[in-house]
């Protein structure tokens, strides 16, 4: 597997928890975003910062079933991110 920046989103009803990790799995940053345009703009700004700093592709994992207002994968595709959906056990 090629090195990549991994982003995980714990989807909530009004806000989402975001974690960003480098290819070794070390946490680069954790933060909350609101489920608003401003919140997602902050999300993409933070992702862009790490993408430029490490010069690596970004993979985003988010809940794929029964999540609250989960962002659609096509939304991430517009920002050239690679979405991965997962099901909680």
Image (spheres, helix red, strand yellow):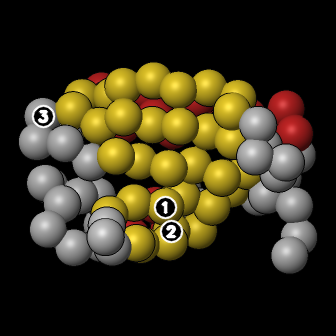
Give how far across and how far down residue 24 sits, in percent.
85, 48
Q: CA distance from mark 2 to mark 3?
A: 21 Å
User: Which is in the foreground here, disc 1 or disc 2?
Assistant: 1
Give how far across and how far down residue 50 sits, in percent.
73, 34
Q: CA distance from mark 3 to mark 1?
A: 18 Å
Q: Secondary structure at mark 2?
A: strand
Give how far across and how far down residue 25 sits, in percent.
75, 46
Give how far across and how far down residue 79 sits, in percent.
54, 56
The residue identified by callout 1 is 61
The residue identified by callout 3 is 14
The residue identified by callout 2 is 83
Q: Quadrant of residue 36?
A: top left
Q: Secondary structure at mark 3?
A: loop
Q: Can residue 49 be seen here? A: no
Q: Quadrant of the C terminus?
A: bottom left
Q: Is residue 70 left or right of residue 40?
A: left
Vertical placement of 62 versus 44: above or below?
below
Q: CA distance from mark 1 to mark 2?
A: 6 Å
Q: Are the residues flagged by discs 1 and 2 in contact, CB closer than 8 Å? A: yes
Label 3 packing within 10 angstroms: few (<14), some (14-19), many (20+)? few
Q: Closer to the N terminus: mark 1 or mark 2? A: 1
């Amino acid at each position: 597997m090629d090195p990549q920046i991994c982003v995980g989103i714990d989807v909530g009803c009004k806000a989402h928890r975001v974690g960003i990790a480098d290819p070794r799995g070390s946490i680069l940053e954790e933060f909350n975003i609101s489920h608003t345009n401003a919140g997602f703009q902050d999300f993409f700004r933070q992702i862009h910062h790490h993408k430029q700093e490490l010069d690596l592709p970004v993979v985003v994992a988010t809940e794929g079933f029964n999540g609250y207002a989960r962002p659609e994968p096509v939304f991430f595709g517009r920002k050239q991110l690679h979405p991965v959906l997962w099901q909680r056990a």
